[in-house]
């Protein structure tokens, strides 16, 4: 059902509209309503979004908005919003702001007192997580890893002792090498490779990291991939001789805030967060 009403005369809003991650049937009725009614659609890839709009029989002006032109496009989009035009922002697939510059646009809108409305919908990471068979909570979503092996190793070395299930996006061309690095740093723990989630050839390969690596040798990977790695168990975490304060400072040195680091250290050591907080601030 298409809605021809325009939002132009109302208070202009930025709508964050999730799009299908593979199966076009996963678009929501509300997403169709918003895409039909807004004045402009800010698209990560206008060609991909154009195919979706054609399928939905929606004719709407698109504005290209991706990581390479975000700095120059945000002022343009803000100007349109401030002049009464509502905008829907979409990524190539799934939720906006996850792997695109949407968060920058959202922050700019909030600073300019422009309403931001997020619609619920498809997200590849969460969809794969709940079907993985690994612990669905707590979890951490990291998106794409650094491409260079050295940077990957340094990044993962700071995450290997986290108890949360970890979600990563990866290219099918790099997934085997990435799993080898996981095996080297994390050890042979439970993992899931999810491929072509929601699509015709959807597949989940479950087992130890070594099992998945062996399967890739006999059945090469094609299509969009996610890696879901189980969190470290208490037995896998070596006893830390550093004080809680020193452990917090180690995590802050790799980019976490003190609040985030305190929360991590309390989980890793299985102690109350307040104990780590007091050790950091008063120790």
Image: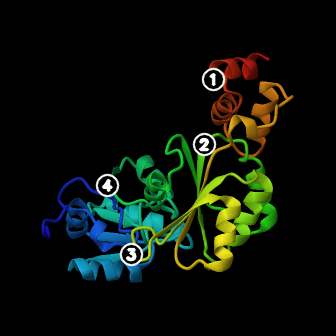
Q: Position of residue 246 (x, y in %)?
A: 82, 30
Q: Position of residue 35 (x, y in %)?
A: 25, 68
Give the CA distance from mark 2 to mark 1. 16 Å
Q: Which residue is mark 4?
A: 119
Q: How many marks?
A: 4
Looking at marks 4 and 2 on the same chain, the residue that comes earlier in the sequence is marked by: 4
Mark number for residue 63?
3
Residue under the image location 79 percent in, 38 percent down:
250
Tell us which disc is closer to us: 4 or 2. 2
The quadrant in which the C terminus is found is top right
Q: Position of residue 181 (x, y in %)?
A: 76, 62
| Image vertical order of residue 147 relative to residue 242, above or below | below
Residue under the image location 68 percent in, 22 percent down:
277
Give the CA distance from mark 4 to mark 3. 20 Å
Q: Residues within 10 Å of mark 4 (few under 14, many from 20)?
A: some
Tell us which disc is closer to us: 2 or 3. 2
Give the CA distance from mark 4 to mark 2. 26 Å
Looking at marks 2 and 3 on the same chain, the residue that comes earlier in the sequence is marked by: 3
Q: Which residue is mark 1?
A: 273
Looking at marks 1 and 4 on the same chain, the residue that comes earlier in the sequence is marked by: 4
Q: Residues within 10 Å of mark 2 (few under 14, many from 20)?
A: many
Where disc 3 sits, the SS reads strand
Residue nearest the viewer, comparing 59 with 77: 59
Looking at marks 3 and 1 on the same chain, the residue that comes earlier in the sequence is marked by: 3
Q: Residues within 10 Å of mark 1 (few under 14, many from 20)?
A: some
Tell us which disc is closer to us: 3 or 1. 1
Give the CA distance from mark 2 to mark 3. 38 Å
Residue nearest the viewer, comparing 20 with 193: 193
Where disc 4 sits, the SS reads loop
User: In the image, is 216 to the left or to the right of 37?
Assistant: right
Tell us which disc is closer to us: 2 or 1. 2
């Amino acid at each position: 059902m298409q809605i021809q009403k325009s939002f132009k005369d109302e208070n202009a809003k930025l709508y964050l509209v999730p799009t299908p991650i593979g199966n076009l049937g996963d678009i929501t009725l509300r997403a169709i309503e918003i895409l039909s009614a807004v004045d402009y659609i800010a698209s990560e890839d206008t060609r991909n979004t154009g195919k979706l709009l054609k399928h939905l029989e929606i004719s709407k002006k698109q504005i290209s908005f991706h990581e390479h032109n975000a700095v120059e496009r945000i002022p343009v989009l803000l100007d349109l919003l401030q002049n009464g035009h509502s905008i829907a922002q979409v990524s190539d697939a799934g939720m906006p702001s996850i792997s695109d510059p949407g968060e920058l646009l959202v922050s700019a809108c909030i600073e300019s007192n422009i309403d931001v409305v997020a619609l619920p919908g498809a997200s590849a990471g969460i969809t794969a997580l709940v079907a993985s068979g690994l612990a669905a909570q707590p979890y951490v979503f990291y998106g794409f890893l650094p491409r260079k092996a050295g940077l990957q190793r340094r990044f993962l070395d700071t995450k290997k002792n986290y108890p949360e299930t970890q979600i990563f996006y990866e290219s099918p061309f790099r997934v085997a090498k990435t799993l080898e690095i996981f095996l080297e740093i994390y050890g042979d723990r439970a993992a899931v490779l999810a491929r072509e989630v929601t699509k015709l050839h959807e597949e989940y390969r479950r087992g130890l990291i070594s099992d998945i690596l062996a399967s890739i040798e006999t059945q090469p990977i094609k299509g969009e991939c996610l890696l879901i790695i189980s969190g470290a168990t208490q037995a896998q975490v070596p006893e830390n001789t550093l004080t809680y304060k020193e452990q917090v400072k180690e995590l802050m040195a790799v980019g976490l805030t003190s609040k985030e680091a305190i929360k991590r250290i309390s989980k890793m050591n299985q102690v109350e967060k307040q104990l780590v907080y007091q050790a950091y601030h008063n120790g």
